[in-house]
Structures are given as C-alpha cells and as structure tokens.
Image (spheres, grey):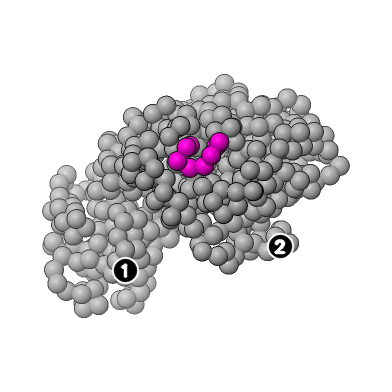
Amino acid sequence: MPYALGLDSSTQSCSAIVIDTNSQSIVAETSVNFGERLPQYKAPSGFIPGGAEGEVHSDPRMWLDALELLLQGLKTQCDLSKIAAISGAGQQHGSVYLNSKWLDIVGSLSPSLPLSLQIGECFSRKTSPIWMDTSTGEECREIAAAVGGDEVVCAKSGSIAIERFTGPQIRRFNKNDSEGYAQTAHIHLVSSFLCSVLCGADAPIDTGDGAGMNLLNIQTWDWDTELLEATAPDLKKRLPGAAKGATTAGSISDYFVRKYGFAANTPITVFTGDNPSSLVGMGASQPGKLVVSLGTSDTFFAAMPGVVADPKGCGHVFGNPSSGSMSLQCFVNGSLAREEVKNKFGYDWDQFTTAFDKTPVGNNGNVMVPFFRPEISPRVDLEAPLLNGSEAFENWKAADDAIRACVEGQFVNMKLRTDWMQLQPEVIYLTGGASKNDAIAQVVADVFQAKVQRLAVSGSVALGAALRTASNSLGLSLHELESQFCKPEADSTIEPKAAAGAYDAAAKMIAELLA
Ligand code: XUL
C-alpha cells in the first residue's frame, strides 16, 4: 500500500504523480495548466507577458490556486489518506518575497478559505521573478566585481553570476524597491515556498535548488557569507536554512488534512528544483549515467562523482538530491539548429535521417559549428554557423553533408563543453522529441563512446519527487526505486560503432573555430 506523492510546480503547469511502492505502479497522475485553468492571472504561458527590461514575473497566488485545483483533481483519482510520504519540485531560480506575517499565517491556515486569499496577505513583492527573467545583467556584474570576478563566483557557487539566478534578482529588488526589501522578512524559492505551505512552517531550501541562487557555497553546501554580502544587506536572516535533499522538512499541515483528507502527520521531504528532481526521475542519480534531453534547446545533466565547477563558467553545479553534486549544461542551438539545416534543403525528417546513411562518420572533415542563435555553451554572440573553410553556410550545396555536419558539430561541441565534469559514462539516457531518431542517437553514442538508451519520460520531475520521498520517508532504496520506475524503452539501445578517436579531428577543428 504505501503511496508516495510527487509534485511539480513548473513554468506552465503544476503536476502530481502518486506511486504505489509495493506494486511498483503509478496510481494517479494529473496536471493543471496555469493559462487554461486560471485565466484570471492573465499568464497564458505561466508568466505575465510584456515585462519591461527583460523582466519575467509570475503571480505566486497562481501557483497556490493551481495547487488546490491539482489536489481537488487528485482526490477524485485516489484516496489521499493512503499517501504516506510527500515531496515536490519547482521551476528553478524563481523567488517569493514574504513579509513578517508569513509564519503566523502559514501556520494557522483556515480550510474554509483558499490558500491564495490567506497567503495573499504575506507578499512583500506582489510578483515573483522567474528563470526566464534577463533583467539583472548589471547586478551580475556588480556581484562578480564585489567578490573578485566571475571565476570566484563560479568556484564558490558552481555557476558564474547569471541573470536568471536568484541572488542577482534579489539585488535588483533591493536596488529598485528598497522599501519592499525592508518589508521582506523571508525569501523562498518556488520549491521551498510550496514545501513551506504544505508543512505550515518555513521549510529549508535544498542544495539542488539552492545552488541556482549564486548564494550557496558548493564546497560547504551552506550560504556563502561573501556572496550574501555582495548581493543585498542582511540577506542571511531572510533565507531559510540550506539542507541536503534527503531531509524531512516537516509534516503535512492541518489545512490539507481537513480540506483534502491527507493523513495527519504525513512526512514531507524537502522540495528541490525541477532539474535535480528530473535527474532522479530519469533514474540517473548515480554517477555513470548521463541524461541528454533533445528539445528546442538541448540539455545535458549528470550526477558527478566529485564537486568541480566549470572553469569556463558555462555549466552549472547543483546539489544532487540523492547525494553529492550534479551538473547541468544548456545548449541553445538544439532542435532549432537541426530544423534550420533540414529546412534549408527542404528535407523532411525521413530524408534528414537517410542523410546519415549516405555520409561517413567524420563527414570527410566537413565540420560545422551549428549556431543559428547566440549560444551559451560556449558563449558566442554570433548568429551564423561557423564552418571549417571559407564557404558560407548559404553556399553549402550538399544537403546530406550539411545535415551530418550539423549533428556531429552539436555533439562534438557538447562533449568538449562537458569534459570538465570528468564523467565516464556507462550509459547515456536520451530523451525529448529528437531522441527517437536512431541516426542522431548513433552520433551521440559514437561521440561519447557510450551506449545510448531512450527514455520515454513525460513526468520525470514529479516522479523524481515521489521516488525521493519514498526513499527518505519510507526507507526504501533510491537505487532500487529508480530501477523499478525508470525503465528505458525496450529495444532502444544503440551501441557505439565508430572507433574511439573517430571524432578527434573534428573536436580539434571545433575547438579552434571557437577559440
Ligand atoms: C535551469 C533553468 C530551467 C528552469 C525551468 O537552470 O533555468 O531549466 O529550471 O524549468
């Protein structure tokens, strides 16, 4: 019987999954799309459109209303009193600003009134900046300068000061609205805010999500005094404690027991960020497994055996909710670039795939760095692909060559940019739209010299939360839970075919083109 509930408050929706750890099955799954179900917040894609100067904010009351709609829906699918453990995850970096009424109000919520109405009294900043916000370039530079440069910020916090990260956002709030900052008694991330609401008390920030703030020291996994001071005055007293992922934050508050029928005292494991949660939900929380998600942008993440920061400052290090650390690296030019090349030649996806049968591994030395938009891994502002040779992309006549060059260029660059993680992959889990394509999967296997398996995951963030709490609160092995719930698709394995070193020449050329 023991059920575990995992929640996921993401950018566009809030989702839940309930697993039965005995029968190793999913008991219930549901989701609430913010734009569709809560149009009153005028945030069709989960954020308020038209923010000035790169600001992207959401109304935190929307997240609370969505949580209630979600639990109402879940209640119709399963008996919530059977849930023996709860955890969750939130979109990373977004922050919630609360005044001095917060602890009293969240600790004594009345089930006859909605959360949003009661907690609505507590916001010292009406809207929350989220990860899409790019308004804090100046604050990033100020924080870096105050502590001795980006290298120092990166070595301390696992990432250089970045616009969407929470510290620069807090700094900007204090600069633009010092009165509002003075009224702020508590600052939470989306994840720790929702965890606190469920517990009816302040919950800690876990090291997975906390490392996305430019405030947490990845060597001590605690707040870094220098970074706090470089960010805003008296910041430490406004933050909750930092805690490792396997920490019990509290137990479900009376509000949820009376309103939704949860069992009293149901334990809640500290929430984490969506990416760290997804690492667990993909079954990759142990070093040796990499996840490559192929979407509009491509994302690479993996559990790391040690704690190292990217010396070039492109990647991120977060706490691994299972233990140790994880890396995350984003590549803007993912499907975006693959589609650009496909469309240039008027190919469909079948023709795109067949191109790989007609061209050899290494593409006879025809190399492309396929950046059609400014890239962040590495940082390149140029909006045109770089080629080895003087030929402009517009003049590239051989469609099949160009397609192979694009995909090989993407993954050779991915390998170059992730070498700092010092990983020795046994298996690469490929997920996302393009992962089904065998030709692309073969290039990944050949470049990384590791076997590739496909994962059919839709709700890896919520699943990761359910697995984490089943491990932390119900005493089950996380490793076993991952192998029970996160199975790669049958017959999806692709082994490397090319010899080790087949991409050495291309790697050298791409490194030179980007030097
Ligand atoms: C990671 C990031 C996004 C958010 C939104 O650094 O900004 O992936 O977590 O999901």
Q: Nearer the viewer, residue 481 or 42?
A: 42
List x then y, in percent, for residue 362.
17, 57
Mark 1 or mark 2: which is in front?
1
Name the image quarter holding the N terminus: top right
Q: Evaluate whether residue 387 shows in this view.
A: yes
Q: Nearer the viewer, residue 110 or 166?
A: 166
Circle 1: residue type: Glu
Residue 232 sits inside the magenta stretch: yes
Work out whether residue 281 can be spotted: no
Mark 2 belongs to which amino acid? Answer: Pro
Q: Residue 372: image x %, image y %?
A: 33, 67
Crowd tier of the residue under label 2, counting other residues whose Cα lies within 10 Å: few below 14, some 14–19, many 20 or above: few
- Rendered residue at 86%/42% (across/down): 112
The label on residue 426 is none
Q: Nearer the viewer, residue 315 or 75?
A: 315
Residue that numbered label 1 is attached to: 383
Residue range of the region highlighted in magenta in the rendering:
228-235
Tell me the residue that label 2 is attached to: 39
Query: Callout 2: helix, strand or loop?
Result: helix
Asked if residue 365 lies left or right of residue 128, the reply is: left
- Disc 1 or 2, which lies upstream in sequence? 2
Percent across and percent down for residue 342 are 33, 71
341 lies above or below 227? below
Q: How far is mark 1 from mark 2, CA to CA? A: 36 Å
Residue at point 35% right, 70% down? Answer: 340
Is the Cβ of the residue at disc 1 closer than 8 Å to that at disc 2? no
